[in-house]
Image (cartoon, helix red, strand yellow):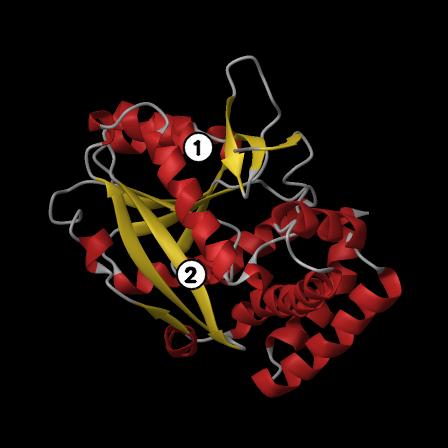
Amino acid sequence: MNALIYYLAFPFLFIISRLPFPILYLFSDGICFLVYRVIGYRKSVVRSNIKLAFPALERKELLQIERQFYRHLCDLFLEIIKSMGMSKEEMIKRFKVHNIEELTQFEAQNRSVFLMCGHYASWEWMMSLGYHMQHKGYGIYTPIRNPYFDRLIKRIRSRHDAYMIPQKKATLIIKQMEEANERGVFGFASDQSPRPKPLTYWRPFLGIEVPVYTGAERLARELNIPVVYGKINRKRRGYYEVTFKCITDAPNSLSPNAITDTFTELLEKQIKEDPIQYFWTHKRFKHAKLKKAV
């Protein structure tokens, strides 16, 4: 069944990947109408998330964010498919990289880097960073259940010099690479919701007390790997940029959870600047303590 679904879907994905960008976005507008107005995909989740994050906004303002978010969401997923047919030159033109020295400075020191970002703007096009570095780029990801689509996603990303590491194997693989003196830039999108456990770290996110992932910080401390924040922003439709901020080049010099706190605060600032670019369909507050955090 997995194979059947894949082989039925692939011709459509291939056609989408070859569409000129103006036609791609006309198609995206049609998909947006279907997803938002007809199907209402996760509309209750999106509406609840935005209202929790911005309780002071009027209903009209909340609905404006909601509508614009769905347009961005449809653009985002079609752009992922489009990247299957994009050349290196097209990707570099549409995903501008600034102050790359915040990453490449560690190449000269023969050190790996942990690159942290949120599910914001076009985090998927961050895969093209390999065009700008000597280090290989690796994304920590959750494999897709359908193995055929999983292979497709890995093939799309490797086309743009990015390689994928399954989340459950990430700690082992990164340790093995460090022991073998194989350096890289490892991307972590660490803003989703972990399942709470007795030792889970909780902190405010957009004013709500939530559990947060600390795995990237713990591994950075153990292996003494610098941590950098990637701030991705949409300039206009189909064009993005990323700038970098070094959180620390000495993880063990900071107090526990300081790296996670800094990452969360930087992401919060981005979301407040332009909330439509955040990934509101994720159930980020499903484990939240819904009394507003101070």
CB atoms of marks 2 and 1 within 8 Å: no
Q: Is residue 20 visible?
A: no
Q: Which residue is mark 1?
A: 170
Q: Which quadrant of the view contains residue 244?
A: bottom left
The residue at 42%/61% (across/down) is 232
Secondary structure beneath dot 2 equals: strand
The residue at 65%/57% (across/down) is 57
Task: Give the residue type that dot 1 points to.
Answer: Ala
Position above or below: 19 against 216: below
Secondary structure beneath dot 1 equals: helix
Q: Residue furthest right?
A: 38
Position above or below: 29 against 132: below
Discs 2/1, front: 2
Distance of label 2 from label 1 (alpha carbons): 23 Å
The residue at 31%/31% (across/down) is 220
Q: Whole-percent x and y of residue 19?
A: 62, 82
* 221 relative to 18 in the view: left or right: left
Q: Which quadrant of the view contains residue 292?
A: top right
Give whichever of 165, 193 is nearer the camera. Answer: 193
* 209 relative to 36 in the view: left or right: left
Position above or below: 80 against 181: below
Q: Is residue 141 visible?
A: yes
Give whichever of 38, 129 is nearer the camera. Answer: 38
Q: Which residue is mark 2?
A: 232
Give the mark nearer the N terminus: 2 vs 1: 1
Task: Give the residue type that dot 2 points to.
Answer: Ile
The residue at 15%/42% (across/down) is 110
Label 2 Cα crowd, 10 Å radius (few <14 / some 14-19 / many 20+): many
Q: Which quadrant of the view contains residue 112?
A: top left
Q: Whole-percent x and y of residue 275?
A: 56, 59
Q: Residue furthest top?
A: 198
* 61 relative to 110 in the view: left or right: right
